[in-house]
Amino acid sequence: MAGHVVFRLLAFGFGLAGLAGCAAAPSAVSASAGLTPASTQALVGSTPQILNADFGPPMIRRTDGQAQVWVYENAVCGLQVFLYPDAGGTPRVAAAVPDGGDQASCMQSFARTVTAAALERPPAS
C-alpha cells in the first residue's frame, strides 16, 4: 500500500515538472508581448511599426526634411522621437528625448499592458 502512495506522489511530481517545462520563460513572454522599452536608448533603431506597437499612434507627427518627429504625451511627460531614413530608406529612431520628467519615470508612464494595447480602437481611416 505504501508503495502505491510513493508511486502516485512520484508520478504527480514528474507530471508537474513536465508541465513546468512547457511554460515559456518570462523574458520570452516580455519580448514578444510588445511591452514598452525601459529606456530611450532602447528605442534607437526602431521602425515606425515598432513604435506603433509599443506606444500606439503619436499625438503629433511632423516632417522636417528627411527627418520625422513623433510626439507622445501623457500626464507624466512628453516624448519626442526622431526618425531618419536608413540606407534602405526605412525610417528608424535616431534619438528619443523625454521632457518634463526623468527618463525612467517617463518611459514607465508610457508602459501599456498587453490587454490595454489589445483593447485600443484602431485609428479611423
Image: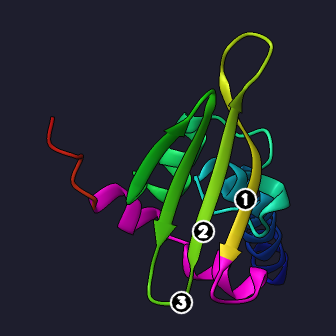
Q: Which residues are magenta?
A: 99-119
Number of residues whose C-alpha sits closer than 10 Å to that of mark 1, classed few (under 14), some (14–19) or many (20 or more)? many
The residues tagged by marks 1 and 3 sit, at their Cα atoms, a distance apart of 16 Å
Residue 61: image location, x then y, percent: 44, 47
Residue at 14% x, 43% y is 124
Q: Which residue type carries mark 3?
A: Val
User: Can residue 78 be seen?
Assistant: yes
What's under tag 2, amino acid-wise? Leu
Q: Would you name the residue on which mark 2 appears?
A: 79
**Label 1 residue SS:** strand
Q: Residue at x 76, y 69 (%)?
A: 38
For marks 1 and 2 on the same chain, the one whose residue lies earlier in the sequence: 2
Q: Is residue 18 in view from this perspective?
A: no
Precedes in sequence: disc 1 or disc 3:
3
Does 50 sit left or right of 18 as displayed? Answer: left
Residue at the disc numbered 3: 76
> How far across and down, in percent of the image, does residue 36 sit?
63, 63
Picture disc at residue 54:
none
Position of 8 with respect to 74 (left or right) is right
Name the magenta segment's main secondary structure: helix
Q: Decide which of 80, 75 is in the foreground and name it.
A: 80
Note whether 33 is above or below 2 in the view shown: above
Image position of 79 with respect to 65: above or below: below
What residue is pinned by disc 1? 96
Task: Tell me where residue 109 sits by quadrant.
Answer: bottom right
User: Measured from the top left, where is residue 117 in percent x and y?
Assistant: 39, 60
Q: CA distance from mark 1 to mark 2?
A: 7 Å
